[in-house]
Image (cartoon, rainbow, N blue to C red):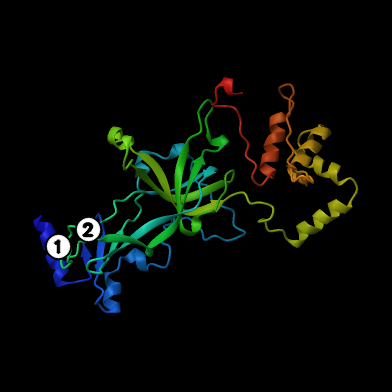
Amino acid sequence: RRAAERRAGDAAANPGVQIGDGNTGVYQQNPNESRNVAEESLPPLLLRRYELRILPRNRPPPFPDEPPTDGVALRQIRSRSMGHLVSLTGMIVRTTDVKPHCVVATYTCDSCGAEIYQDIASQREFLPHYKCPAPNCPSGGSTDSLFLQTRGSKFVKFQEWKMQELPNQVPMGHVPRSLSIHVRGELTRGAVPGEVVTIDGVFLPLRAESGYQQMTGGLIVTTYLEAMNVIVHKKSYDASNMDDGVEEQVTAIAEGKDPVGRLSKSLAPEIYGNEDIKKALLLQLVGGVERKLPDGMKIRGDINVCLMGDPGVAKSQLLKFVSTVAPRGVYTTGRGRPRVNY
């Protein structure tokens, strides 16, 4: 109580300074102040017009022709990495919609007209303020005189991803691990499900802030990665940079003799034969034509291929080669799963 009275006295002597403890981050702005003094009393996040990111020292600047740098697997991250900057490589399996995330909440007092700013930072949940903390407020902090102003608050774009280990990173008989990725600002929409990415971020704990999990969780917390940089390994055909030499080769093959047979022979050339299977996989890579019927029904042009045969006839090798050629192809197996799911 004495500390609260001392802070209130300091605020009365110096209007426009921070009120409250450091955890809540409440700021008060006097409407009678000059503009320069009022701007000094605003929280720094409200005045920031740029994004602050932390990158590892060995991370080169993003050049178009430079190959991306690989990170470590999820299962190589230990508890000693908590709070440190790490680089992870994995596959994005799920993304949420981009939603606004409030970082600074602005309130207006109906009694004294003061503006109160609450610095929320990176919290997922917060307790709104209803009573004015100003010492010279006529309400005296006894009534709910604060109202949240949406236009005066600051929001940033927020998206949550789910990253999973790559198939070649999972040991035999183990289940792939996953990790939540929190993406903010211009990094949102940087990847879609199915893409292999390398993410630089800070490995942080996330404790349940409310509900049954908070009561029963105790000291156990979940972890997430606060993304600072995103590098996409595989790009689509539209995003790939094709020079004049590649375009001339494509035109020569298209105008040449038997382009389908020539392209099918380039699929897994170390495997002899299987011409019909290679042609089927080539047609699957190219895809069909989407048709729209007169009644409005659409027929997808995607082609599905099912390979069945004896062991040792290069089924898996053909599929591995196709997954490396396709921009968003991911090779997965049934290892780590029970046989009832086959």
The kind of residue tagged 2 is Lys
Label 1 environment density (alpha carbons within 10 Å; few <14, some 14–19, many ≥20): some
Please indicate whether residue 284 sits to the left or right of residue 121 in the image: right
Residue under label 1: 7
Q: Residue furthest left?
A: 2
Residue under the point 23% across and 70% down: 16
Residue under the point 36% across and 68% down: 47
Residue under label 2: 131
Q: Nearer the viewer, residue 225 or 263?
A: 225
Q: Is residue 220 above or below residue 14?
A: above
Q: Nearer the viewer, residue 318 or 283?
A: 283
The kind of residue tagged 1 is Arg
Please indicate whether residue 267 sits to the left or right of residue 77 in the image: right
Q: Residue furthest right?
A: 257
Mark 1 or mark 2: name the one nearer the start of the chain.
1
Q: Are the residues at dot 1 and dot 2 in contact (C-beta closer than 8 Å)?
A: no
Label 2 environment density (alpha carbons within 10 Å; few <14, some 14–19, many ≥20): some
Q: Is residue 202 above or below residue 213?
A: below
Residue under the point 37% across and 44% down: 81
Quarter-wise, where is residue 104 in the image?
bottom left
Mark 1 falls on what kind of element? helix
**The C terminus - image quarter:** top right
Q: Distance of mark 1 from mark 2, alpha carbons?
A: 16 Å
Quarter-wise, where is residue 142 in the image?
bottom left
Please indicate whether residue 245 sits to the left or right of residue 171 in the image: right
Please indicate whether residue 78 sits to the left or right of residue 253 in the image: left
Residue 296: x and y, percent? Answer: 74, 46
